[in-house]
Amino acid sequence: MPLENFERALDDFEAVLAAVPPGCWDAPSPCDGWSAADVAGHVIGALQATEALAAGRFEDPRLGQPRSVAGDDPLAAWQASRARTMAALGPAALTRPVPLPWGGFLPLGEFLDRYPVEILVHTWDLAQATGQDVVLDADLVRGALETAREFAPVGRDAGLIGPERPVGADASDLDRLLGLFGRSAG
């Protein structure tokens, strides 16, 4: 089913977002210099950028302040952005070539097939920032790890992610994924 993994990753993020305890939005996240609200706003902004790409508009989601995208009710902002984005992802939109953050183009559907990697990492970030235990879908993590191995060096060269953290030979797929993005589950 097209976009199945993308939607499953969105579901996981929404579950963590919906469970953020009151008063935790200012908590620091594993993303250097970002709060929980910043992480939420970043992912909401990425959905808004996806909606724009589906419509043939190429906007840089890194512009502006992620916290302002989250607004006063990050869950409501997320749900509205998610609904608009999913409605925009028709067959024509999914075949539209879109610019990649590190250069080049890919059909939007193919890009979204690989996009769970970022959503999963930020789901983990938000859970860590807000004191939640999260168990990410093992199949999604495994697939995201393959994407991350391809993307991380290019993303690092483009300045989009920080240095890789080493993990042990017996590390889980999640630990390996997080390490590629400069995070440590320990």
Image (cartoon, rainbow, N blue to C red):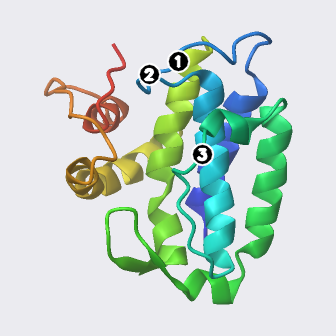
Residue bearing the label numbered 3 = 64
Q: Position of residue 133 (x, y in %)?
A: 58, 17
Mark 2 Cα shell of 10 Å, populated few (<14), some (14-19), many (≥20): some
Q: Quadrant of the C terminus?
A: top left
Residue at (32% x, 63% y) in the render: 102
Q: Position of residue 121 (x, y in %)?
A: 46, 37
Q: Position of residue 161 (x, y in %)?
A: 32, 41
Numbered disc in front, either 1 or 2: 2
Query: Disc 3 or 2, which lies upstream in sequence?
Result: 2
Q: Does 47 sit above or below residue 156?
A: below
Residue bearing the label numbered 2 = 30
Q: Does 162 sit above or below residue 27?
A: below
Secondary structure under tag 3 reads loop
Query: Disc 1 or 3, which lies upstream in sequence?
Result: 3
Residue at (27% x, 31% y) in the render: 179
Q: Position of residue 85 (x, y in %)?
A: 74, 64
- Left or right, 10 with respect to 140, comes to right
The Cα–Cα distance between marks 1 and 3, rounded to whole angstroms, is 24 Å
The Cα–Cα distance between marks 1 and 2, rounded to whole angstroms, is 7 Å
Residue bearing the label numbered 1 = 128
Query: Disc 1 or 2, which lies upstream in sequence?
Result: 2
Q: Quadrant of the N terminus?
A: bottom right
- Left or right, 51 with respect to 135, comes to right
Query: Mark 1 near mark 2, Cβ–Cβ under 8 Å?
Result: yes
